[in-house]
Image (tube, rainbow, N blue to C red):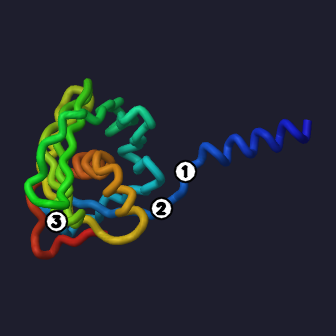
Amino acid sequence: MRTLAVLLLVACASTSRAQLGEIHLRPYTELAQPPAVFSVQQGRILSPQLDVTVDPDGCARGTVAMSSVQLCSKADKAAPGKEGDVVERWAGPSGDVTLELEEQGKQLRMDGYVNVGARSLPTRATVPLGQGPQWEELRRHPILLALAAAAAGVRGEPTENTKAE
């Protein structure tokens, strides 16, 4: 019995993800409002309104605003605008999003939409990326940041007062 308990603890520990930190996002037009807070783990981002994981098969799955989402990385990657930029396209039953990490990973541009229930959330924004392990993880999986930004209502371009938190 004791061996079974130890095996169960080891199994649970191996499936847990490392906690990397938090990010704070808010719409650029509402800087006085409190930000939405998202917890970043290895291959996962979560908050009360969002829980999405990038699976080994290259698909992002989870929930946004209590609606199921699934977007998969597409092999048809566009040429980046500048050296060092990375362009990805994610599509599936939940939407179609094009992402571009620009300026050597200092910002993420996104364009497209994500279907959430009966409505569609636009993903048209530029989001500055900060420093730290949580931001490095989002550079590895920019679809997670795009979904969090869409859920938080981030649209358009950042202002001078906007910084990554």
Labels in figure, total: 3
In the drawing, does residue 126 fall left or right of residue 3? left
- x and y percentages locating residue 64 in the rendered image: 33, 39
Q: Secondary structure at mark 1?
A: loop
In this rendering, which labeled residue sits more in front, label 1 or label 3? 3
Amino acid type, label 1: Arg
When asked about the image quadrant of residue 136, the answer is bottom left
Residue drawn at the location 12% of the way across and 51% of the way down: 80
Q: Dot 3 corresponds to which residue?
A: 103
Q: Secondary structure at mark 3?
A: loop
Q: Secondary structure at mark 2?
A: strand
In this rendering, which labeled residue sits more in front, label 2 or label 3? 3
Distance from the alpha carbon under mark 2 to that under mark 3: 23 Å
Q: Is residue 93 visible?
A: yes
Question: Which quarter shows the C terminus?
Answer: bottom left
- x and y percentages locating residue 85 in the rendered image: 18, 57
In this rendering, the answer to whether 58 lies above or below 9 is above
Distance from the alpha carbon under mark 1 to that under mark 3: 29 Å
- Give the farthest residue toward the right: 1
Q: Earlier in the sequence, mark 1 or mark 3?
A: 1
In this rendering, the answer to whether 63 lies above or below 87 is above
- x and y percentages locating residue 156 in the rendered image: 9, 56
Residue drawn at the location 42% of the way across and 65% of the way down: 133
Q: Dot 1 corresponds to which residue?
A: 17
In the drawing, does residue 47 fall left or right of residue 162? right
The label on residue 20 is 2
